[in-house]
Image (cartoon, rainbow, N blue to C red):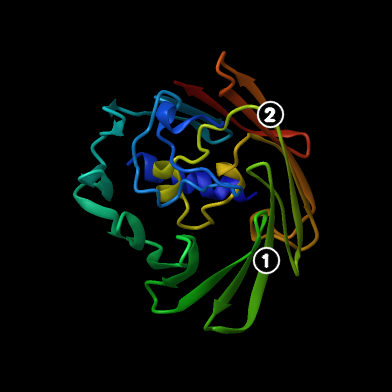
Amino acid sequence: MKNIFKWAFVALALVGVSCSKSDDNNGGGGSGSGSGFNSGDFTVGKHFPRKITTTEEKGKRERTFEISNGKIVDAPYEYEGNLLKRIKYNGRTFQEFFYTNGKLTKRIHAEEGTFEYLYDDKGRISKKYRTFPSGNSTTTEYHYIDANTIKTIYKDRSNSRDLEKTYHFSNGNLIREEDSRGTIVYEYDDKNNWMYNNNFIITISSVLGEFFDYDYSKNNVTKIIVRGNRSEDYRYEDATTTFQYEYNSDNYPTKVTQTKDGRVQKVTEYQY
């Protein structure tokens, strides 16, 4: 599943709900998920987890976060003013970010290559260019069909065929992805997702995905249904993954159990 690979990547980035901006400083609104991306605001509030514990078959991982004045101040993260500038490990720059008027316009990733972002006159991302360390390059175009539909066109110079994908949203949640390989359908609870409109987490973890992926939806995903030869993350198999939650008094998740086809894959616990 997409979430497995991406969160393995996010865990590395992190190591080494819907709530008001005044509460969590999560950025602007909008009909699409992840609309806080490129808000220029990297502060986090009381609903950003101070500790995340993940248990899988291969073992347990724990990560704690030090937050001061709304900013994550752990050693890997370097800022210039209020903007996240670098993520470093053992003296090596893992990611470096470049901005224009507070919007991310370029990202250099030590392993994944260089990413450049263009925007339309409404401030929405319109193109993403990626140059791999090998020198190969790809382009992703973003077309906003209506308030609840985004179409992307992925172009790979090493492959003459373009891949078109359509994303459908409802009430701030990504509910469906479809392309020539099949579909993914998402179902959600009615509780708060701590990653919604969180510019910090969306920026560092959307390298290999999109800023409107289901992880950043308004609510928490409860079921993912894949049909057809759709996804390399599912190895082209039909699959259903479910998520069961426990919540705190503010309706944010404290525990999520991820199950695929009846088998528990991962348990994640959050302390706020």
Tell us which disc is closer to us: 1 or 2.
2
The first of marks 1 and 2 along the sequence is: 1
- Element on which disc 1 rests: strand
Identify which amino acid the numbered label 2 is placed on: Asp
Give residue 157's position: percent from left, percent from top: 52, 83
Residue 24, above or below 104: above
Give residue 162's position: percent from left, percent from top: 63, 79
Q: Residues within 10 Å of mark 1 (few under 14, many from 20)?
A: some
**Residue drawn where x is 39% and y is 43% of the image:** 200
The furthest residue to the front: 121
Side (left or right) of 189 relative to 84: right
Q: Which residue is mark 1?
A: 165
Judge whether residue 190 can be spotted in this image. Answer: yes
Side (left or right) of 138 relative to 164: left
**Residue drawn where x is 31% and y is 30% of the image:** 70
Give residue 25's position: percent from left, percent from top: 40, 34
- Viewer-nearest residue: 244 or 196: 196
- Viewer-nearest residue: 234 or 108: 108
Give residue 193's position: percent from left, percent from top: 56, 32
Which mark identifies residue 10?
A: none
Q: Which residue is mark 2?
A: 190
- Residue 94, by quadrant, is bottom left
Judge whether residue 87 can be spotted in this image. Answer: no
**Residue drawn where x is 46% and y is 66% of the image:** 121
All told, the count of numbered labels is 2
**Residue drawn where x is 78% and y is 39% of the image:** 261
Disc 1/disc 2 C-alpha distance (Å):
27 Å
Side (left or right) of 148 relative to 101: right
Identify which amino acid the numbered label 1 is placed on: Lys
Do the CB atoms of the residues marked 1 and 2 lie less than 8 Å apart? no
